[in-house]
Image (cartoon, rainbow, N blue to C red):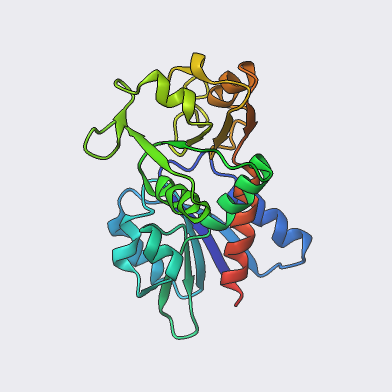
């Protein structure tokens, strides 16, 4: 039996288990399973890693950064980004951390921007997913500013975000969990009145497909994209890593 799964808390929003279970059934992989492991704290991860038939894990909030200290090695991207969302067990039983979010973000930005190059970007959130967004934008040479609930971690807080920054940041990325199922009525608190038809809004959330954040952008004429493209690309990248 080859066991895979996802760790995080909460996990009700995640489509990973359904995605891989359907994949295993479609490809006739009857000896493969994918499970949700809702860890109360990251301190429970070593016991899970000790499971003999565990081959790989995906990692979601809030453990993308905390898991790093418990792994034996990191890929270049995971080390540079400072967060992991994929863990792989090698033939020697060692666990390496990878960041396939960056693969998904490259695909999502290609799909949304279609070659356009926004002069500035705004990233909402400063967690592990945000770090991958920062890496992806730096690759493209797109300057960005960070919005955080914590003044020490961002350029702005949601309470002091200037309207003109929103207006000139033609790419706005929601890298926070705000708006994720079941809290579907919520949206990051930014002045949406300054979003224009020249804007692009990317939400890393894919459940629901149309978040309040994206809907507000759509109402203002902006181009919008949810996290589905990113999710599928990073899931496929995880599968390739687990089978190298």
Q: Residue at x 44, y 17 (%)?
A: 191
| Residue 189 location, quadrant | top left
Q: Is residue 1 visible?
A: no
Q: Position of residue 75 (x, y in %)?
A: 44, 71
Taking the view exactly as shown, the residue that stands out farthest to the left is: 152
Question: Relative to residue 19, is residue 237 depicted above or below?
Answer: below
- Nearer the observer, 229 or 16: 229
Q: Position of residue 107 (x, y in %)?
A: 63, 51
Q: Residue at x 35, y 75 (%)?
A: 72
Residue 156 in the figure: left or right of residue 108? left
Q: Is residue 85 visible?
A: yes
Question: Relative to residue 40, is residue 94 depicted above or below?
Answer: below
Query: Count of labels shown?
Result: 0
Q: Position of residue 91 (x, y in %)?
A: 50, 84
Taking the view exactly as shown, the residue that stands out farthest to the bottom is: 92
User: Which image quarter holds the N terminus?
Assistant: bottom right
- Nearer the observer, 16 or 37: 16
Q: Position of residue 65 (x, y in %)?
A: 34, 55
Q: Residue at x 44, y 54 (%)?
A: 135
User: Which image quarter holds the C terminus?
Assistant: bottom right
Taking the view exactly as shown, the residue that stands out farthest to the top is: 193
Residue 157 in the figure: left or right of residue 50? left
Question: Relative to residue 220, is residue 209 depicted above or below?
Answer: below
Q: Residue at x 41, y 74 (%)?
A: 95
């Amino acid at each position: 039996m080859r066991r895979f799964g996802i760790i995080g808390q909460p996990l009700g929003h995640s489509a990973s288990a359904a995605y891989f279970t359907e994949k295993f059934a479609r490809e006739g992989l009857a000896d493969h399973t994918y499970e949700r492991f809702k860890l109360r704290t990251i301190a429970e991860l070593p016991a899970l890693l000790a499971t003999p038939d565990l081959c790989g894990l995906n990692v979601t909030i809030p453990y993308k950064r905390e898991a790093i200290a418990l792994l034996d090695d990191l890929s270049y991207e995971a080390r540079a980004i400072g967060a992991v969302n994929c863990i792989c067990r090698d033939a020697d039983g060692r666990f390496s951390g990878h960041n396939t979010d960056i693969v998904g973000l490259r695909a999502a930005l290609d799909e949304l921007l279609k070659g356009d190059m926004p002069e500035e970007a705004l990233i909402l959130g400063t967690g592990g997913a945000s770090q991958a967004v920062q890496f992806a934008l730096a690759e493209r040479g797109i300057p960005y500013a960070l919005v955080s609930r914590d003044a020490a971690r961002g350029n702005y807080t949601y309470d002091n975000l200037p309207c003109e920054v929103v207006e000139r940041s033609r790419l706005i990325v929601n890298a926070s969990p705000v708006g994720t199922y079941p809290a579907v009525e919520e949206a990051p608190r930014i002045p949406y009145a300054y979003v224009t038809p020249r804007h692009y809004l990317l939400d890393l959330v894919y459940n629901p497909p149309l978040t309040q954040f994206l809907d507000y952008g759509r109402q203002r004429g902006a181009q919008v994209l949810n996290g589905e493209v990113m999710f599928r690309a990073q899931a496929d990248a995880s599968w390739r890593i687990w089978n190298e």
